[in-house]
Image (cartoon, rainbow, N blue to C red):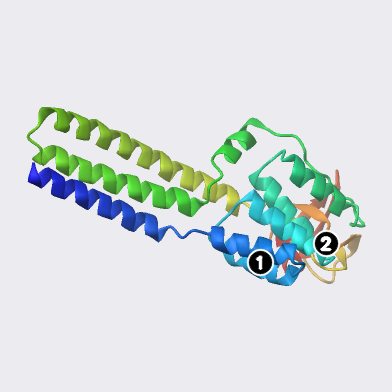
Amino acid sequence: MLRGRIIFIFILFISVSIKAEISDPSGVFNEGNKQYEEHNYEAAINSYKGLCEEFYSPELFLNLGNSYYKLDDIPNTILYYEKALKLSPGNLNILHNLKLANKRVSDKNKINDSVRLNDWFFTWASNTPNYWAYNSVYLFIIGSLLLILYLFSKSRKLKKLTFYTAVISLILGIFSIVFSGFHKSRLISHEEAVIFKPSIDLMSEPTENSSVSFVLHEGTKVKILDETKLWYEIRFGDGKIGWLQKEFVETI
């Protein structure tokens, strides 16, 4: 009985330790919100962007877009509204703000307000990849420790309880790994980009000496078709295709 209590306490200790590893972003996020409400938009942006490398949420990207909009930085506004919409397809608030920002763009962007089945699933599973990774580690450790408790327990009821709980924990851990990989692959699959140069020539080939196909302006969203080391082949609208240098765009 004493041995079981010791193992149980050890499980709780490991749980608390792992939870502590998952940093809480709410303090920094709330600080950004406070700066925004006080019209300190650059300070708000700094707070929000400090979270972007590790945490992803439509609210975070939406607030970043709102802050850039207040500073009349339309390319960054479009970029972060599109990132927010990527995480939360069909979100009416994001769509409304994106449509307002799109009125400030010379080459009007096509806004996708339809929601597919896989978009709904992604929205449901839209915690950060780190969250799912931490969660899988947490569940695997708990499952392993429960199996140890099962092996050393002499109580039939306790053995049954710990065994089935351990199996459930390990299965959930596997699902967390799958979600982490799924989420990560979608976030790093950059199929669209936003132009950050006031005016840019789209070339017929990925060289500066090729002929100009057409011209686009800052804030314009384009579809990425292909790429080289320094160039993207893009499509704008329903049919315009050309090449532009990577340094003048940010991927969504």
The three-letter amino acid code for the residue at tag 1 is: Lys
Which of 5 and 118 lies nearest the eye of the viewer? Answer: 5
Residue 124, how many percent across, how many down? Answer: 57, 38
Query: Mark 2 sits on what residue?
Result: 74
| Residue 105 at x, y percent in the picture | 89, 57
Which quarter of the figure has residue 247? bottom right
> Measured along the vertical axis of the image, is residue 241 above or below residue 161?
below
Please tell me which residue is depicted at 59% across the width and 51% down the height of the picture: 187
Q: Residue at x 67, y 63 (%)?
A: 34
Label pair 1/2, CB-CB below 8 angstroms: no
- Separation (CA) of disc 1 from disc 2: 27 Å
Q: Secondary structure at mark 1?
A: loop
Q: Quadrant of residue 39?
A: bottom right
Q: Can you identify the residue that label 1 sits on?
A: 229
Residue 225 appears anywhere in the view: no
Q: Examine the rendered structure and indicate whether residue 92 appears above or below residue 156.
A: below
Residue nearest the observer in this picture, 1 or 176: 1
Hey, what amino acid is under mark 2? Answer: Ile
Residue 142's disc number: none
Q: Residues within 10 Å of mark 1 (few under 14, many from 20)?
A: few
Left or right of 33, for residue 25: left
Q: For the residue carrying disc 2, how many other residues have a C-alpha within 10 Å: few (<14), some (14-19), or many (20+)?
A: many
Q: Secondary structure at mark 2?
A: helix
Identity of the residue drawn at 34% across and 49% down: 138
Residue drawn at x 38%, y 59% is: 20
Question: Could you tell whether 129 is left or right of 98 in the image?
Answer: left
